[in-house]
Image (cartoon, rainbow, N blue to C red):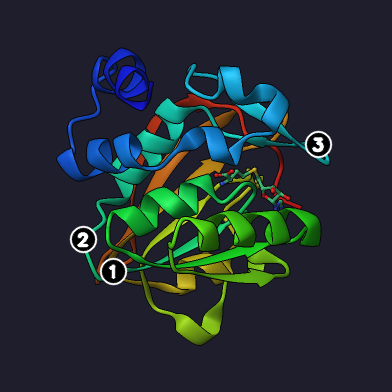
Amino acid sequence: MLQWMVDSTIRSRGIRDPQVLRAMETVPRQLFVRPEDAAEAFSDRALPLGLGQTISQPYVVALMTELARISPGDRVLEVGTGSGYQAAILAECGAEVFSVERLPDLAEQARKRLVELGLEVHLRIGDGAQGWPEHAPYQAILVTAAPQHVPRELLQQLDLGGRLVVPEGGREGQVLRVYRRTKEGFEVSDHGAVVFVPLR
Ligand code: SAH
């Protein structure tokens, strides 16, 4: 089923990075959704996690991971752990993952899943809009809830050459945006419309 998911919705929509494809074929997505949604785990849909939050659709997880251009050993910050699925994909790509979630219940469930899968991810409960300065700078930052404008604290925690991937915008619409830190400042590129829950 994972193979089918990757072939039908990820490869066919243009994701090419072999490391991302392999990670998506390896992490058991069905374990990150609610048991009653297990049958839908492999379709290209966002699914509810409870508490008004959602696990992103597989294509968007793959796209954000590809845009982050992870190399093994990179320190990567994720804002919005949710189910832990995106964190698992990043860990499977060889990153050292730091992930922040504001809702303790979701963070606890994610912690259990990741431990059961033997994936090492550093989790913290708190406001991810502040980042996790103790472990900065990060070679990549993935924001998986949408801010109106990307918080300055997150941009500051990005390494030179690092990539921050964020759905930016409010109710009027969000765009998936990449900020790459350069010596002069930031290079910005847009990668299409997306729909995420808001960053609180
Ligand atoms: N990446 C997740 C999906 C994230 S859904 C996955 O793979 O399943 C967005 C998550 O961001 C929710 O769990 C929400 O509680 C969390 N969130 C929203 N605002 C936040 C904030 N300021 N700090 C940390 N987490 C936040």
Up the image or down, 182 lies above or below 197; here it is below
Classify residue 1 as left or right of residue 84.
Answer: left
Would you say the residues marked 1 and 3 are in contact, meaning their CB atoms lie under 8 Å apart?
Answer: no
Q: Secondary structure at mark 3?
A: loop
**Residue at the extreme bottom:** 134
192 or 182, which is in the foreground? 192
**Left or right placement of residue 44 versus residue 39 in this view:** left
Which residue position is annotated with label 2?
71
Which of the marked residues, 1 or 3, is nearer the chain's N terminus? 3
Under circle 1, the secondary element is loop
Q: Which residue type does callout 2 highlight?
A: Ser
Task: Report the residue at 53% width, 63% height from top.
Answer: 115
Label 2 within 8 A of ligand 1 by Cβ: no
The residue at which mark 1 appears reads as 74
- Image position, residue 71 (x, y; %): 21, 60
Disc with the residue nearer the chain's start (2 vs 3)? 3
What residue appears at the point 47 percent right and 21 percent down from the top-left corner?
42
Label annotation for residue 52:
3
Measured from the top left, where is residue 102 in percent x and y?
A: 75, 61
Image location (x, y in percent) of residue 97: 43, 66
Q: Nearer the viewer, residue 135 or 58?
A: 58
**Residue type, numbered disc 1:** Asp
**Residue 88 location in percent, x, y?**
44, 52
Q: CA distance from mark 2 to mark 3?
A: 33 Å
Asked if labels 1 and 2 touch by Cβ distance under 8 angstroms, the answer is: yes
Kindly report the distance in space between the C-alpha atoms of the residues bearing marks 1 and 3. Answer: 31 Å
Name the quarter where the N terminus is drawn: top left
Q: Secondary structure at mark 2?
A: loop
Residue 134 higher or lower than 119, as above or below? below
